[in-house]
Image (spheres, rainbow, N blue to C red):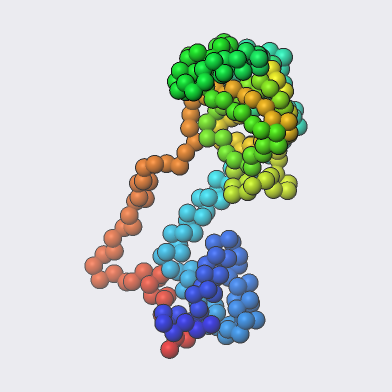
Amino acid sequence: MHDASTRHPLAPEWRRWVVENLLRGAEAEDLVSVLARAGVDEALARSAIHAEMEDPCFQGAARAVAMQRKLEGLLDLYGDLHRQSQSHPHITRHEALTPRDFFEHHYFQNLPVVCRATVVEDAVLQTALERLGTATRAAWDERLPLAPPRGIVAWPSPVGLWRDAAGTELPLTPSRRNTLVCQVRGRALFVLVPAYALHRVRDAAAVPEGVLHWDVELSPGELLLLPVGWWFAFRSPEGGVAVTFDAFAAPEPNVMWTPRPESREPTPPPRPRAAGGAAAPALAGRESPARD
C-alpha cells in the first residue's frame, strides 16, 4: 500500500478510505487496527493517520462536516418534536378552511393540509380546454373558468394543469415552491415526506425504510397544499386531471427552494504568523520517518 509517486506511506485509495472514515467520526485507533490487518506496520499506520488529521485540507473539511452534522441534528430534533404532536399521525383534512387558518396553521407552518373546494367542474374544464385548443398558456390562464379559493390564492395568476394517463407514477421529488393541487378528475395518490427528513431521502427514488411519511389520497373536489421543501411521490391509478396554483395571497406570493446562485463569502482568513515564527503543527507533522 506504499505510494512511491507521492512519497506517502499509503496508496491513494487507502488515504481516501482513512479520510472518509475520519470525517464520518471513526476513531483513529480503529483505523490503525484495520490497516494493521491489511499488512501495514502499526507505527506506520498511526503516523499516516496522524498526518491526514493534521493536514489543513482535512481540518477544513472536518469543520464543514461538523456544521453539516449540527444541521442534520437540528432537522432530527424538529422531527422528534413533530412526532409528539397530536396531528402527527395524519395529514389534517377540513371540509372548509378560512384564509386565516390556511396561512397561520399550515402555509406559514410549512405543513400540508387537505380541504374540500371545487375550483372547476370536470366537464366545464374539458369544454374550455377544447375551445382554447392550441392557444398559448397565457391565453388559457386568463380564460379558463376557474374559481380558486378566495383569500388563499392570489388571483388572477398563472395556473398549472396536470393531465395524467392511467398508471402515471412520479418518483420521490422535492417541492421547490408551495403548490396548491386541486384535483378535478380521478384519484391522485401522494406520499409526503417532511422537509426535516431532507438528509434521509436525498437522492432516493422511494421513501427509505424508517423515514416518517404520510399517504394521502386526493379525490375530485379536494385541494392539497404541497409545502415548499417537502418531498412527494405521486401515482395516478386511473388517470386524472388537476389544476395547480403557486401564487398565494401572502406578503410574498411564494418562496423558492433553490441552491444559492451566488458564491458564498469566504470565512475569515487565518491570522498571519509573526516573522520567524515556528511552522504550524500541520506542516511539521507531515514528515514521517517511515518514508523512503
Identify the residue at image location x=32%, y=71%: 278
Identify the residue at horizontal 47%, vertical 82% (top origin).
Answer: 3
Residue 273 position within the rendered picture, expressed as x and y whole percent measured from the top left? 29, 64
x%, y% of residue 153?
Answer: 54, 16
> In the picture shown, does residue 1 fall above or below 18?
below
Furthest residue in direction bottom, as rendered: 292
Q: Nearer the viewer, residue 284 or 230?
A: 230
Q: Position of residue 168 (x, y in %)?
A: 67, 37
Which quadrant is the C terminus positioned in?
Answer: bottom left
Does residue 124 appear in this view?
A: yes
Give the residue at x 54% y 74%. 14
In depth, the one of 77 and 253 nearer the eye is 253
Task: Report whether 117 appears left or right of 147.
Answer: right
**Residue at (25%, 71%) from the top-left corner?**
276
Count numbered badges in the picture: 0
The quarter of the picture where residue 107 lies is top right
Q: Is residue 189 left or right of residue 9?
A: right
Residue 6 position (above or below residue 76): below
The picture places residue 238, in percent across and down from the top left corner, at: 73, 31
In this rendering, the answer to whether 30 lies above or below 130 is below
Instruction: State whether residue 85 appears in this view.
Output: no
Name the image quarter holding residue 71: top right
Vertical relation: 128 (above or below) 79: above
